[in-house]
Amino acid sequence: MNGHLLLVLPVVVPLATLALCTLLWRRPLAQRLASVAGSAALLAGAVALLVAVYDGTVLATHFGAWASPFGISFVADLLSAAMVLITAVMAVAVSVYSLVDEVRERERALFHPLYHGLLLGVCGAFLTADIFNLYVWFETMLIASFGLLVVGGTRAQLDAGVKYVTLNLVATTLFLVSVGFLYGLTGTLNMADLARVLPRVENQGLVTTLAVMFLLAFGSKAALFPVFYWLPAAYHTASAPIVAIFAALLTKVGVYALLRTFTLMFTGDAGYTGPIIGAVAAMTMITGVLGAAAHFDIRRILSFHIISQIGYMLVGLAVATPLALAGSVLYVIHHIVVKANLFLIAGAVRLASGSFDLKAMGGLHRSAPLLALLFAVPAMSLAGLPAMSGFWAKFVVVKSSLDAGHHVLGGVALVVGLLTLYSMVKIWNEAFWKAPTPLSSQAAAQWRAAPRLRWTMLAPIAVLAAITLSIGLAAEPFIDYSLRAAAQLLAPTAYIEAVLGQEVMR
């Protein structure tokens, strides 16, 4: 399979699935089958892309008759290929999970077309080589997410949607303004070309100012402190499959944009932006975990933990050593799987207990023992306990911080890990261990009486738990891959040459 086809498949497949699902709107069963098949096709294409770049090859393609830096380009290296693959894995898992529980209500609100529109925007953002087209893919992703957030049309969802749209539009406007200033300063928007041009700009103070503007814009998308308010205000209102795909992907596109731009474009001002990123990472970890500790709604707890865990991913960018960036890459991959799984489990817990409120739950370790076991895997991983993917991700992040002399960052990461364990133990004690309530007893009986619903929901949860265990028990290949991806980020010559051609570099 040629490189051009490998690079376009991750956007062509969701686009085609989106169109097909729209045409099949009045045929629910056919629409569901098309949605799952489209997700599976995306996974197959993502696997082929990862295989093509696994040896360190950087693939690039240019559309139309316009060569870089003037035309539209797609590029895939180890990081972007891994992000596309993990996106596809989540797409399949959530597609299967969404086949039950309020599926008809979602389908009437065009869930499947919007869902694949979201995947289209996410994959495009991971593959684009142009900073303006990154903005375009962000917009594609966010338009779809706006629609998905209000599926159901409840008052709480509409209120959350207004907050979500307003705060994200502010960040998007800042992003677009920053892109305009960047083009005015350099005359180019191709990221590989910007990597070549920005170090030659005479006014490096202006370049640093632009770096801070992009940090604020992407930081808002990634839900970093102090611009994270949109996330806990909105995520708890969406249904389980929707919030699971949100938790897996939306903030990670912002993290990916930060990793890409600050290792490729804004490399000359690390002495100024590095401490800022480190302080933001520490405050993000602390704010998120304290917010989680204060709540008893399982969705709100998990939403605040998204914020907290994003801070770990930024530690690598602040420390900026090969090991630290490898920790960020590994953490992103681990967190996408674990956090999506926890939200899927939250949806199952609601059906098995009758509520999202921990105080109204109880006794699930007896009424739903398999669900209890499947919760324990991602919960322990999120807390960073040994034999789980989260342990290795946290270990690499903390070790790289301490090795580089960033003892405060390392200490904050360790303390936040303990507080994360507290939140997971709180969920376990309230939902699974304590005596059942009348509401949870009634819901548990209905859960046991619906085997098709139960197994359709538990199957993708079990697969994601198996992935978490695989990373934890066989961590070496994943750490090795992360180290090689980090090396590509810190030495982007191959990326630049793949996009611009070797003759430009001479």
Image: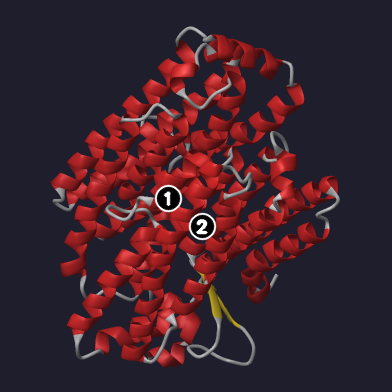
User: Residue 20: which quarter of the image?
Assistant: bottom right
Counting from the top left corner in percent of width and height, residue 395 is at 30, 40
Please give left or right for residue 157 compared with residue 151 in the image.
left
Viewer-closest of 220 and 489: 220
Counting from the top left corner in percent of width and height, residue 212 is at 25, 70
The residue singled out by tag 1 in the image is 332
For label 2, the SS is: helix
- Is residue 321 in view from this perspective? no
User: Residue 238: which quarter of the image?
Assistant: top right
Q: What residue appears at the point 69 percent right and 33 percent down from the top-left corner? A: 101
Mark 1 or 2, nearer chain start: 2
Q: What residue appears at the point 28 percent right and 48 percent down from the top-left corner? A: 284
Quadrant placement of the N terminus: bottom right
Please give left or right for residue 379 compared with residue 111 in the image.
left
User: Residue 119: which quarter of the image?
Assistant: bottom right
Amino acid carrying label 2: it is Met
- Is residue 73 in view from this perspective? yes
Amino acid carrying label 1: it is Val
Separation of disc 1 and disc 2 at Cα? 9 Å
The residue singled out by tag 2 in the image is 83
Q: Is residue 73 above or below residue 305?
A: below
Quadrant placement of the C terminus: bottom left
Q: What residue appears at the point 32 percent right and 41 percent down from the top-left corner? A: 394
Labelled disc at residue 486: none
Is the Cβ of the residue at disc 1 closer than 8 Å to that at disc 2?
Answer: yes
